[in-house]
Amino acid sequence: MIRQRVLPLLLLVFGLASSPVIADGGGYSSSNSRLAPFQELIENEEYEQSIARLEEAMRDNPDDADLLNQMAFSNRKMGNYDVALGFYQKALKIEPEHRGANEYLGELYLQLDQPEEAEKRLKVLDKACFFGCGEYDKLKQAIAEYRMKNPS
């Protein structure tokens, strides 16, 4: 709790404040105009179109963790869990502490009834977000909700 209160203050004091992270297609700054077209499609739940556009972008950038995360997110939302899992894993191989990919992979594990794996993603986020972050908070809440619905 203290981490979450201290970070904004430190960022302001040292002039390190940045633009907010977009919540749902996540893990990157809203100022990243390169990813904005995909985010707009995802926000509008146009996942098939998002996937088609991401495939084009990934031809030139096959190892871009943000693009891989977006591709995984879109596939997960369409129910293509195996495909999504592969993209999340590839994104995390490139950038192990990618906050969006860790959060969403944790959510996928909950959808697959693998809460222990989701807890592992939460631990990674806890280390990656030393002063706290929205991705950690959202995954922690999702795990708590899962546990309430699935006691045992």
Image (cartoon, rainbow, N blue to C red):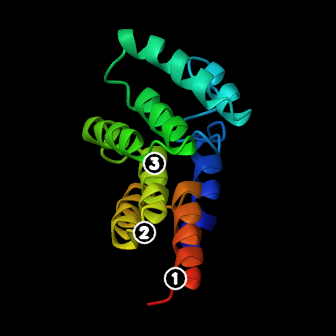
Marks 2 and 1: CB-CB under 8 Å? yes
Q: Which residue sits at x=49%, y=37%?
A: 75
Whichever of callouts 3 and 2 sits on the residue coming sooner in the sequence is 3
Work out how far the residue at label 2 is from the one at label 1, CA to CA, in angstroms.
9 Å
Please rate how many residues cluster around mark 3, counting C-alpha atoms within 10 Å: few if below 14, some from 14 to 19, many from 20: many
The structure residue drawn at horizontal position 47% and vertical position 31%, both measured from the top left corner, is 71
Q: Nearer the viewer, residue 35 or 149?
A: 149
Question: Circle 1 is placed at which residue position?
Answer: 150
Vertical side of 64 occupied by 100: above or below? below
Name the mark on residue 113. Answer: 2
Residue ID at (36%, 37%): 87
* Quadrant in which residue 125 is drawn: bottom left
Residue 74: give x, y in percent of width and height: 54, 36
Marks 3 and 1, the one that precedes in the sequence: 3
Q: Position of residue 119 (x, y in %)?
A: 38, 70
Q: Give the residue number, with chain letter if any, for mark 3.
A: 99
Q: Quadrant of the C terminus?
A: bottom left
Q: Amino acid at mark 2?
A: Asp
Q: Residues within 10 Å of mark 2 (few under 14, many from 20)?
A: few
Q: Amino acid at mark 3?
A: Arg
**Residue found at the far bottom of this picture:** 152
